[in-house]
Each structure stands twice: as C-alpha cells, then as structure tokens.
Amino acid sequence: MSDSPNSKPRLIGINHVALEVGDIDEALAFYGRFFEFELRGRGEKMAFIDLGDQFIALSAGRRQPTDSDRHFGLVVDDREGLRAKMEAAGVEFVDDKRFDFLDPWGNRIEIVPYRDIQFLKDRAVLRALGADASRKTDAAREELRGKGIEPPADA
C-alpha cells in the first residue's frame, strides 16, 4: 500500500463470522451432527469453531427474524455427503439448487464445495483439517487465473 492520501487498504480475507443462536450447547450439538470441527474456545455465551485458519463465533441471544437473503457460504470437502446427512435429519432447505439451509435460529447458510470455487486454502491448513481437497474444477481454476492467481498443479 502506498502512502498516498487516496490509497485504501485492500480487503484480503475474512477472519471470522459471528452467528447469533438461541443457546450455545444446542448450537454446538446441531452443528456437531453435520460437521467435524474443533472448538477454538468456549464461554458461557460464546463458542468459537475452528475452520483451519479462520473461525465461526456462536453468540447466544438471537434477536432478529429468520434470514431470507442475508447469508454466508461455508466451504466443505463433501457437499453431497453433507446433503444426505441433512436430508435424513429433516433440515429445512431454502434453496435446493444452491444448497442453502436454515439453522434452528434462522441463520441462512449456503454450502459450497471446495473444488468448485475460486478459493484456495494452504495445503498445510487442509492437511491439518484432514480435508479431502479434491482437485479444483476447470471453471474454478479459470476464475483464479482471471484474478492473476495461478493455482498449484495439485489444486
């Protein structure tokens, strides 16, 4: 970044997303039914779920109505396996094509397969997560190249 008065900081990532839930224990149980994760930390009204080098914060005390368009995307290594588990558990899907669901507190979450998106996790992070980092699709590789990012041969 230059020292010019017109220069602006560049966005480079997301450290975490905070979700309001009704109860921390119930939220950990709900998400634990579908995702393998490690707790980064836990308090009476907060819990932090590791996503490798990022995290999700769960905060007790949901105050707003169910999300309709507001959402965020979680990246997974086995989208179809997750869909089957969620269907069997009766989870409410909002958009089948995009694989959006509502958690019990009305948070809308989109599930995105790692191999299909212009998003690269460092191999060390993927190994630490024990994630199946399947090779990126050609479309995802082209999106990365369009941004000036040459994906590694094994990505």
Image (cartoon, helix red, strand yellow):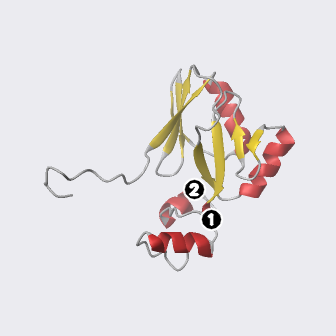
State the image coordinates of residue 141 (x, y, percent, origin top left). Answer: 55, 73
Quarter of the picture containing the C terminus is: bottom right
Q: Residue at x 52, y 80 (%)?
A: 153
State the image coordinates of residue 63 (x, y, percent, origin top left). Answer: 57, 19
Q: Is residue 80 left or right of residue 108?
A: right
Nearer the viewer's eye, disc 1 or disc 2?
A: 1
Type of the residue with mark 1: Asp
Of residues 152 and 108, the one nearer the viewer is: 108
Of residues 44 and 22, the one nearer the viewer is: 22
Q: Residues within 10 Å of mark 2 (few under 14, many from 20)?
A: some
Type of the residue with mark 2: Leu
Q: How many marks?
A: 2
Does the image show residue 155? no
Q: Check the image and report above or below for 4 versus 146.
A: above
Q: Residues within 10 Å of mark 1 (few under 14, many from 20)?
A: some
User: Mark 2 or mark 1, which is nearer the start of the sequence?
Assistant: 1
Q: Which residue is mark 2?
A: 129
Secondary structure under the numbered disc 1 in the rendered image? helix
Quarter of the image where one finds residue 93:
top right
Q: Which residue is mark 1?
A: 116
State the image coordinates of residue 32 (x, y, percent, origin top left). Answer: 69, 39
Of residues 60 and 142, the one nearer the viewer is: 142
